[in-house]
Image: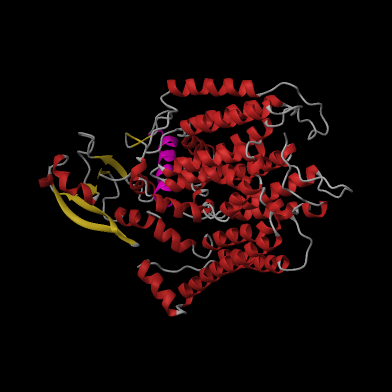
Amino acid sequence: MNQPTPAIVTQSAVRRLPRIALVLFCVAYVLPGFLGREPWKNADVSAFGVMLEMAVGHSGWWSPRVLGVAVEEAGPLPYWLGAVFIKLLPFLSPEFAVRVPFALLLALTLVCTWYTVYHLARQPAAQPVQFAFGGEAKPTDYARALADAGLLALMACLGLAQLSHETTPDLARLALVSLMLLMASRMAHTGQRQPWRSVALWGVAVASLVFSGAPWIAVTLGGGLLLILWLSRRNQEAPDTAWLTSEAPSQRDPLAWSAVLLALIVAASALTGQVPVPGLQTALNLVEWQSWGQLLVWFTWPAWPLVLWTLWRWRHQLLRPHVALPMWAALVSIADSAQSPERDRALLLALPALAALAAFALPTLRRSVSALVDWFTLIFFSGCALVIWVIWFAMQTGVPAKPAANVAKLAPGFVPEFSWWLFLAAAVATGAWLWLVSWRVGKHRQALWKSLVLPAAGSTLCWLLLMTLWLPLLDFGRSYGPISRRIATLVPAEGCVLADGLTQAQIAALQYHGSLKLVRTTDRGAGADCQSLVVAPPNQATLHQRVELTHWAFKSTVSRLTDTKESLLIYQRVGN
């Protein structure tokens, strides 16, 4: 028995967000962070170092290594993307070339999220109430309006900004999870046209996710989505063909072939060593539940309040595909983040599903609640933008004195830079925000996506301001570039340098920024001609086990200017 839908939507409420505005939103969100900055520590520069090793032939393609040691992140596929683009774009710097495919992956995530919400909103159970005398929202217009809202909800999530602009396997997994959710939403329509396209893309997404270092996520997520679709088919009396407009629907059910593909991929991944079996990385009694809860609150803001409202208002349709599919996708990633050592990166995969659920809150949201969200967003993001501008002005002029002194204390040795291009980009973005605020507080007809315009625009504005006004400061504080270049001045320009106890990120930075030829101390006989030695302080106590200390003299300690706790020790050879 079909439960009544809680959505009451008129045709006037499903106006389309202008396409040019939506495209500009996406461009303004995607490009900052991929343009003009150095690789940041730790995951960003680590992954970049692996891609560079592959591109120059120092690492195998099936077993990525850095100086002969297996990489920290399993799954070679994301590294292949960066290495291939370094080879395809030799006229670009390697650090920029690797960002091209990852910027496309972020764009793919946004596109998949839009179409996921669109297809879910076309489900019969998701349709709004039909009025006795007409005037209810048309299905296509209703789906487009909700899709616009879902995309805005994704861009508004605070946790998406930094991690989605890094060249790491996490961004590849994010795009693949969103693609899996899109294919599941397409297969939810029993009468869909071109079902084999959905099956093929489903298989590509699952296989790619397995070889991106997340085999058990691929299997758990994929198996759950197929089970939900199978259960919904059992309760469906007739094929859903009302959403088709031009081509005749295919009666072939793609679920069986999708399940076969999933089973084959599981078998293939097991044979290649990518075992799709989840293991508790952190015992449940050792999980810091309070800090994890705090991460959930800020990382998924402002989507999570809308998600809770969706689950309450649509509680009679929890087993329907438009609620069950994104709910399962979100639960898998949230559960993974609870016991993962890198909680934020695991939680990143839940954001497209949470954005889809948040979109379905809007047809049931009261106007007073919508106004509260708008005012909170206006105050929060306007305050953040003002702080960014004030601190930038203080860095440039020394006024106000206190913010300038705080910057000098936190980043000793930083010399502020002024760029007209970065300043103009920040000024244009701020002007657009002011215009958008004036438009939003004006008297306009209500649209479903209207409540998420300010959150998405505010998040985009703050991220763009950080990547323009604060970009030199962030590069100085978060990059290994300064310390690598200083170490390069302390060692001979030619020849090799022994490395002991360095992390993958430090090795990548010294090789790229410092142009050093590193050799591990564990490689017996390989560093006999090296005249310099770089040591991580924790390894100093056991250094005598790997090198003859009587042949080396301590030369200097080099610390990161913004973090005195992170330093490297430099030794110089004095005998053989």
Which residue, as the protein is rendered here, is positioned at the far front?
A: 1
- Residue ID at (51%, 55%): 36
Horizontal and vertical percent position of residue 281: 37, 38
Horizontal and vertical percent position of residue 460: 59, 58
- Please tell me in which quadrant of the rendered image residue 101 appears: top right
- Residue ID at (23%, 53%): 569
- Residue ID at (19%, 56%): 555
Which one is nearer the viewer's eye here, 32 or 150?
150
Q: Is residue 211 left or right of residue 235?
A: left
| Magenta stretch in the rendered image | 39-58
Q: Is residue 1 magenta?
A: no
Name above or below for residue 400 compared with residue 198.
below
Question: In the rendered image, is residue 94 in sight?
Answer: no
Horizontal and vertical percent position of residue 272: 43, 23
- Please tell me in which quadrant of the rendered image residue 498 appears: top left
Which one is nearer the viewer's eye here, 461 or 228?
228
Question: In the rendered image, is residue 195 in sight?
Answer: yes
Q: Is residue 73 left or right of residue 9?
A: left
Horizontal and vertical percent position of residue 58: 38, 34
Q: Is residue 43 magenta?
A: yes
- Magenta stretch, main secondary structure, is helix
* Quadrant in which the C terminus appears: top left
Which one is nearer the viewer's eye here, 176 or 50?
176
